Amino acid sequence: MSSETAVGQPGQDQVAAALPESASLAPKPAVPLFGKARVLVRWESALVVALALTILLGALTSRQFLTSENIFSNVCLLYGELAIMTLPMTLIVVSGEIDLSIASVLALSSSLVGYLWDQHWPMPAAIGAALAAGLACGAFNGVLVTRFGLPSLAVTIGTKTLYAGIAEIVLGPSIITNFPTSYTTIGVNPVPGTHQLLSYSALVFIVLAVAFAMLLHATPFGRSVTAVGWNKEAAQFAGIRVKRLKTLLFMVSGLVGAMAGVLYTFRLSTSEPDNGIDLVLPVVAIVLLGGVSIFGGKGTMLGVILAVLVYCGLQSALLLTNFNANALEIVTGGLLLLSVLIPNGGELAARARRFMNRYRVSGTQ
Amino acid sequence: MSTFAGSLRQPAGGVDGGASSRRLADLIFRAREFGIIAVLIVFVAVTTSVQPRFVNSQNIKFIFSNAVIFALLAMGETLVVVARHIDISVGSVLGLSAYLSAHLFSQVSGMPIVGVFAVGLAIGLGCGAVNGAIVAIARVPSLVVTLATLYIYRALDVIIVGGGMVVASTLPNSFLAIPSSSWSELSSVPYLAMVIAALVAFTAYCLRSFRSGRELYAIGSNPDAALLAGIPTGKRVFTAFVLSGGVAGIAGVLWAATYGTIDSTAGYSYELTVVAAVVVGGVNIFGGSGTVVGAALGALLLATINQALYVLGISSFWDPAIDGFLIVLAISLDHWITVRLTSALRKRSLYHVV
């Protein structure tokens, strides 16, 4: 609070103008958008408005948008795994790291399920092995980042290729499609008792979203995650076991990625090494759209959940119009830009004002 | 402080502690590029001993034609990365430039090749300027901005291309010959590789010796200190993004000349490979250290490895896994060297003070 009020004071303002506003990766204190009304204009509120507008747009442009069929097959089924992966990614980004390998873990898990099933493993064992592999992938990331002290951005670019590569080795040229119908129906049928609305992947997302939200916001562990993201050294001195915590987060990410891989396999009834491989950047985009700071320490699960809904709703609404399906990602890009530009709008205006003032002063001399 | 920057950042140049430690630093800095060259030589030697036809001119030509585009992109990316930023939109810029520039040949009769390069460059500079302006003026994280423009440029590409594509038959032969033309039939190093090498050398010189080049390292080492020292950080960062975009634009034209067939997927998912090449080349992902020569060599190493795996008859299914493993290995090795170097420098400078 102290730093926020200080910026508003006239004497401090010039100091603030002279001080560097880091254009760097360093986190900086939140600048009030409209003074103390900041609470009212939280990013989550903006997302709620965006969600309302999305639903309005969808309902106005197509009669199909609000039908349970559209919600089930064009939202829940299509984006279930993507939504699931945003949850562990949120925790990791809040802790100040990033995991770009999560979609490759999905691909590896999908390939393993297919390969082991093809090798006549019982399905539960194959799923168990895939989840264990995901956990191992996450642990490997975690060890490289925490014990070797390597930057996660670089490490997970490497392991992204590595895990996707292992998936290719596992399956080779074959594509496995002969999955038992008792499992593939899980992938494509709605959960009974939900009025044909929710897919199993959406159900998993909802359960995990509640669990992750409670974990992040209502447990000591979650507060530690935020603390580590805000200031690693301070968290360390406060007694938080930073390395262990981060390793754990990467393992959670691997496990959830593998879960998404299993669901993905059953949805498409196909096991291929490039399953879902392109999902990683959308996952990061949604998390950032949800108001999570890329520098860590800031972000709420509510924001990310809302961002998931906005993203999926908008894409599905545009799909129902005759929008070029391949150009849908322009929405992702546009939203992402807005998500960083709008919260910075206040600061931007202040800097423009300062610039004008300086110009006026130098003009009179 | 960025929390995941690692506590042991390599100071850029001008290290305290006198000439001896500076010489040591110089040596190991240079050794880093030597390290990549050594790995390259060992790799080529081992591959050749197993499969002698690896060093025939056809293979070498192939490696260079693959490497030049990535080397070029890695060079542009390095300018941004040393300033502690990142540009992951280069793949989309490449795609946009590749289609729009190659499309000109069928649209405008008698289109000069130089004009096509100019258009590609202009597209790249424009895209880079948008990235740079948003990053420098709005002061928002470059990872987010370029992730957004990655999608936007690609979507523009998709909208412009539609279902169409440019095919090699609409392109003049002299244009398609650019990537492979060389001194003589026997010479395996294409002109293009020499031109790119010269460009990389020139950029390396600018980064090392020009004031603005040094300032990029200063910004990457400590942005706040750089600003207080009077460096126009916004302007420098903007320029770095513009150059990175421009280089990606040129790379797009070369991509068109190399592959001949261009649809809206040109350069798709190149961005992380480029960052990988930069990191393998010893550039610190959190800015402040690294050279364009290293980055270009990193790209060459990755291209060589891919071709070697092919020549050795290792199933192409192993390619990505080996690539990924090598990237992780390179990052670990580089980090290990940095830690060693830092402690060595600290000892030296203590000794000097006492």
Image (cartoon, coloured by chain):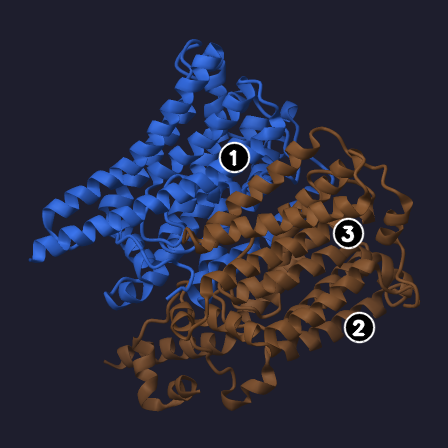
Chain colours: A brown, B blue
Q: Quadrant of residue A328?
A: bottom right
Residue drawn where x is 38% and y is 53% of the image: B239
Q: Amino acid at mark 3?
A: Leu
Q: Are marks 1 and 2 in contact (CB under 8 Å)?
A: no
Q: Can you give x and y, in whole percent of width and height, for residue A17 in the image?
A: 33, 78
Toward the viewer: A127 or B30?
A: A127
Q: Can you give x and y, in whole percent of width and height, for residue A228 in the image?
A: 47, 69
Please determine if labels 1 and 2 lie on a single subunit. no
- Subunit that carries the residue with mark 3: A
Q: Are marks 3 and 2 in contact (CB under 8 Å)?
A: no
Discs 1/2, front: 1
Determine the secondary structure under disc 3. helix
Please determine if labels 3 and 2 lie on a single subunit. yes
Which mark is on residue B323? Answer: 1
Determine the secondary structure under disc 1. helix
Decide which of tag 3 and tag 2 comes sooner along the chain.
Answer: 2
- Subunit that carries the residue with mark 2: A
Above/below status of B226 relative to A182: below
Please determine if labels 3 and 1 lie on a single subunit. no
Determine the secondary structure under disc 2. helix
Above/below status of A201 relative to B329: below
